[in-house]
Amino acid sequence: MNTNTKNRNIEYTACPSCGSSEISKKFSAKDYTVSSEHFEVWHCAQCEIRFTQHIPVEEEVGAYYQSEEYISHSNTSKGLVNRLYQTVRNLTLKQKRNWVQKVSGRDSGKILDIGCGTGEFLSTMKAARWETLGLEPDPSARAQAQNNHGLQVHEQDHLFDLSKANFDIISMWHVLEHVHRLHPYLDQIQEVLKPEGRLIIAVPNYQSKDADIYQEHWAAYDVPRHLYHFSPKGMEMLLEAHGFELVQKKLMPFDSFYVSMLSEKYKHGNSRLFAAFISGLKSWMQGRRDVNRSSSVIYLAKKKA
Ligand SMILES: [Zn+2]
């Protein structure tokens, strides 16, 4: 095999979000869940987002998702951290649904969930009589969403086949940081969202308290699967550049604890529950005072008038 076709990487010479050339390396982070490889995390001085340098091309990134521990795409409940994640996810599903209904001002409507995984969130929406559509790149997650919940789910590129002004809500829960074609995706999302629709994007926040505590061991860097590490300022600029206006930023409270548990494991080799709890608590309290310090932030946006 020609070595040039193997392990093809992308080297950014400008910020992948805002295009600025004021970029510099911050540190190296390890892929703790799959490859044990190291990847550089770079910083943009203009929009303050960080990004993973030398990421695998889109066609080859799949190898970095091949892990039983990579649970976002499956429903295994092995291990304490995973069990906690599952429990919390179930608790938060109804909260998410209530919040979506509140911010959309609707009891029902049409929702597109991009990166729907095994479909738990969409299933909750469907049970509340929403018309649902899911997009998911992982075939086994897609099959589970279809078989377990009877959901309509397509591959991710189906996004570009959808008709204009189609959805009341488009949601991406911890998904945008995985998307190679960041700008085409956001442009197309803008097209298929109804004029009065709402866009919901939840992403980790490297400017959080827990990211401060764990530095390069912070679990939500999750290189190379997380291509971008968004800041509140960078996200606002990115949304603006694609014709959106930020309406609200919201804390995702449980992420402080979950990410702290994983980060403890990465840094010290075990989950050190008490230390993780203290870090999680500090992060959660700071996030409550200032959402810009929250472990993950939910961004709610509407189309610019
Ligand atoms: Zn930038």
Image: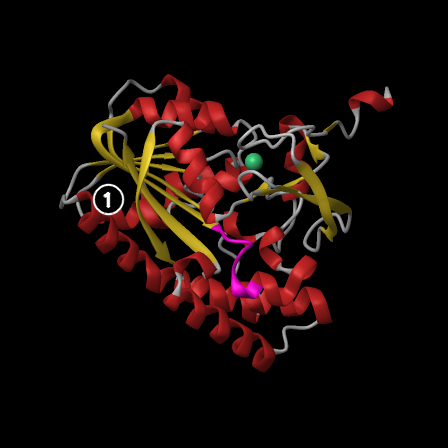
Q: Residue at x 54, y 33 (%)?
A: 17
Magenta stretch holds residue 54: no
Q: Quadrant of ligand 1?
A: top right
- x%, y% of residue 299? 36, 46
**Is residue 143 visible to us here?**
no
Q: Residue at x 39, y 27 (%)?
A: 242
**Is residue 126 visible to us here?**
yes
- x%, y% of residue 180? 57, 30
- The residue pinned by badge 1 equals 126
Compare residues 69 and 173 and report the one nearer the observer: 173
| Element on which disc 1 rests | helix
Q: Residue at x 43, y 46 (%)?
A: 118
- x%, y% of residue 113? 35, 38
Residue furthest out toward the bottom: 274
The N terminus is located in which quarter?
A: top right
Q: Residue at x 54, y 63 (%)?
A: 259
- x%, y% of residue 133? 31, 33
Q: Is residue 156 left or right of residue 245?
A: right
Vertical order, 63 against 123 (above or below): above
Q: How is the image coloured?
A: secondary structure
Q: Is residue 283 left or right of residue 11?
A: left
Q: Give the magenta range.
A: 204-210
Compare residues 207 and 222 and report the one nearer the observer: 207
- Place residue 224 in its image quadrant: top right
Magenta stretch holds residue 209: yes
- Place residue 273 in its image quadrant: bottom right
Q: Amino acid at mark 1?
A: Lys
Q: Is residue 56 left or right of residue 231?
A: right
